Image (cartoon, rainbow, N blue to C red):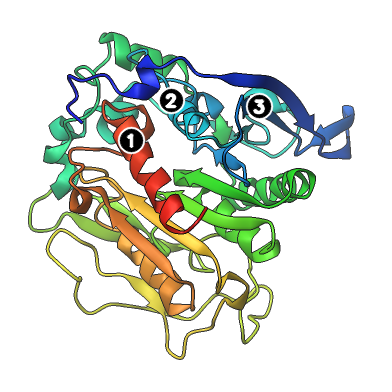
Amino acid sequence: MSLSTPHPTDTVPLQISDVRGFHVPGDYVETDSGTLMSGGIFVEHYRPAKILKSAPVVMVHGNWQTAANFTGTPDGRRGWAHDFLRAGYEVYLIDQPARGRSGNPADLHGLREGKSVEFVEQRFTNAADSKLWPQAAKHTRWPGSGRRGDPAFDRLYASQVEALVDRRATEQLNLAANIKLAEQIGPAIWLTHSQSGPFGFALADACPDKVLALLSIEPNGPNFHECLMTGEAGGWFRDSEEVVRPLGAGQLLMNFEPPLPAGQPLPSQRQAKADAPGLVPCHLQTEPARQLPRLGNLKLAIVVGEASYHAPYDHCTAAFLVQAGVPADLIRLEDRGITGNGHMMMLEQNNHEIADLLLQWLSDRRL
């Protein structure tokens, strides 16, 4: 569909029977300031007038974001929540613990940080000018210039919030909260983005009967070492010296077989050569690789934008999971004729076209 042709999600009135918000409580914690609650989440629940799908969809935002990522775009169009509602799915939207409307007790969980205008421009909205990775020049789908002062950029930046710095604490809080929500609403399709990618893997490992499918949109990665972007042609990438993800795809120990002792990192090794130009060599498990049998039947799609900073390395997350016996379907949008997208694809000009692809993927798998 041409960008000049409005998508039905933006033009057809939505038939919604109910919209509600509720909190999933966390745990009480004793502090020097008195008793506080840690780990609660706020959830929005949207119900279409006609429920056509048996399983709901739960959408979980990424770092420095809130559920607002899925309710509208910076140029004033409807969001992915509306695409799924139009298709007949119930939709749940989460604000992560200690984020947005989920409660943010100042005495708990340590440091928080936001991101500067310059970071947001370089990584999210104006990658073509930053040229920090080889695919960045292809970024064409952000609405507007992607620079401060442009209305769409200013609206996006106004939505950014501080987030916890501690990666492990973040994943622990989200896993506990997501388990409680999964037990409350039952089997569902989960959609994660960026930082929340590992939350989906951990939840599916902890509650395989509650995660019918996982749409992992550019999950936080790559495995083991951070990928640092240099902006230097011929040497675009370098590995962080620190092993940031010692357990592979996240901070939390999953149910590997044979079991991995608590506190022990997964043995890993780096590929001798990248799979293709413009990609990073992957860090994968040292063979024989431990398996993740509880994820063996998971329907999993890892979706990557053509111009995103994830484009050089999300294949490594897919390869790590496949090596562990998880049938991951790596979808590069450009291979499906959807070009020019950056990391915040749910907010970009062709967001509905991408949602249509996700909906078709689910339909093909009878979900």
For image coordinates 40% across by 17% down, the residue present is 12
Badge 2 element: loop
Comparing 28 with 346, the one in front is 346
**Residue 261 image offset from top left, x and y in percent:** 67, 80
- Is residue 220 in view? no
Looking at the image, residue 24 sits to the left or right of residue 63; the answer is right
Q: Which residue, given by chain and number where applicable, does mark 2 sit on?
A: 79
Q: Quadrant of the N terminus?
A: top left
In the rendering, at what x and y percent does residue 127 appear? 21, 34
Report how far apart the C-alphas of labels 1 and 2 lie in the structure.
11 Å
| Left or right position of 222 against 142 | right
Q: Is residue 23 left or right of residue 94?
A: right
Q: How many marks?
A: 3
For disc 3, the marked residue is 44
**Nearer to me, 206 or 85:** 85
Q: Secondary structure at mark 1?
A: helix
Kind of residue at disc 1: Met
Of the residues under marks 2 and 3, which one precedes in the sequence? 3
